[in-house]
Amino acid sequence: MIHSLFLINRSGDVFLEKHWKRVVGRSVCDYFFEARERAGEPENVPPVLQTPHHYLISVYRDNIFFLTVIQTEAPPLFVIEFLHRVAEMFQDYFGECSETVIKDNVVTVYELLEEMLDNGFPLATESNGFYFAFPGTSNVGEKLPTGQLSTIPWRRSGVKYTNNEAYFDVIEEIDAIVDKSGTTVCAEIQGVIEACVKLSGMPDLTLSFMNPRLLDDVSFHPCVRFKHWESEHVLSFIPPDGNFTLMTYHVSAQNLVAIPVYVKQSISFFESSSGGRLDLTVGPKQTMGKTVENLVITIHMPKAVLSTTLTATHGSYTYDPATKKLPNLRGSLSLQTGVPKPEDNPSINIALKIQQLAISGLKVNRLDMCGEKYKPFKGVKYLTKAGKFQVRT
């Protein structure tokens, strides 16, 4: 399936390559470099590229492009998920996933990749099974790694903690487009539940929600027993040790997506003079009494805008002539002399955070544990933040 893997930094340099079936020349990356140049931003590079003889599938993680080369058709999402597993493996094994760390541990990196893929097919992708597999100073350890002795691939055996604890973070991102009158054109929520579980032994957990039926398009960690979710809408699982993503979900029903802020705006450019006016007011709307934090408003101004004279009633504003971005703004605009008035008004991008609130209304009901006799510390945190949140003017 996967013939080769190339790791490429932001500068476009290939700093590591691994081949399984046969060596594929670096010249195949030229197609990727062309797409990277057209995309502008690294996040906008198409994840799947077709070349005359290969398919190129990539993900962008931690300022690194993970690029695979495939000769025959394969499920793209399957390959993309594997690439994310590779990045997470480096993160878990070395503490961070960066170009410097990978170069410093290049021998171990090659050993990990050799274990994760067997002749180009994914074999082992759970980091728990690799702990202590490669001692570092020698390729032969004194004993088998504890992860290889477990009957559950994602959890190593013999786990012991002085303090047993299980914490869950419910994180939701709002993607929305709001028109000039304040009407929501489209809105949806992308959610994820991140877990940090440090429990001794082999605990069996059950996590229940107060309103699970509002969730669409759920995706689970392999540890979750899917039949329990289908029949009872509860999460039953033996967790991996440490940090992991328990589930992701989607809320597409627009009537269930609450827009947490309102934006009253007026942007105009004068016909008679090289100037314009900007007036912007932002306030909380549906936050359930929670405080909106880290609010940043960004407007990509037209090229004709030369400078600004603004007054901020709260917070501060900056104007970057290179990127034409103005967060938190109110005042007048100056246009270049002799340049025609911009035809379209710029859109407003919003970034925000709301602690201890899941904007969809999702709430964890309880967490139960069986299989062990101790009582763990348990906790749940909620966070709502803006994803692609745009207001049209």
Image (tube, rainbow, N blue to C red):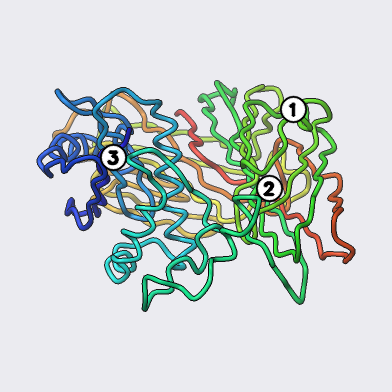
**Image check: 293 left or right of 224?**
left
User: Which class describes the residues within 10 Å of circle 1: few (<14), some (14-19), or many (20+)?
Assistant: some
C-alpha span from label 2 to label 1: 15 Å
Q: Which SS class for mark 3? A: strand
Q: How many marks?
A: 3
**Image check: 304 left or right of 365?**
left
Q: Which residue is mark 2?
A: 170
Q: Quadrant of the N terminus?
A: top left
Task: Please say if 218 is above or below 130.
Answer: above
Q: Which residue is mark 3?
A: 68
Place residue 46 in its image quadrant.
top left
| Coordinates of residue 163 in the picture (x, y in percent) | 77, 73
In this view, the residue in front, 309 or 197, is: 197
- The residue depicted at 29 percent of the width and 46 percent of the height is 324
| Coordinates of residue 241 in the picture (x, y in percent) | 65, 60
C-alpha span from label 1 to label 3: 36 Å
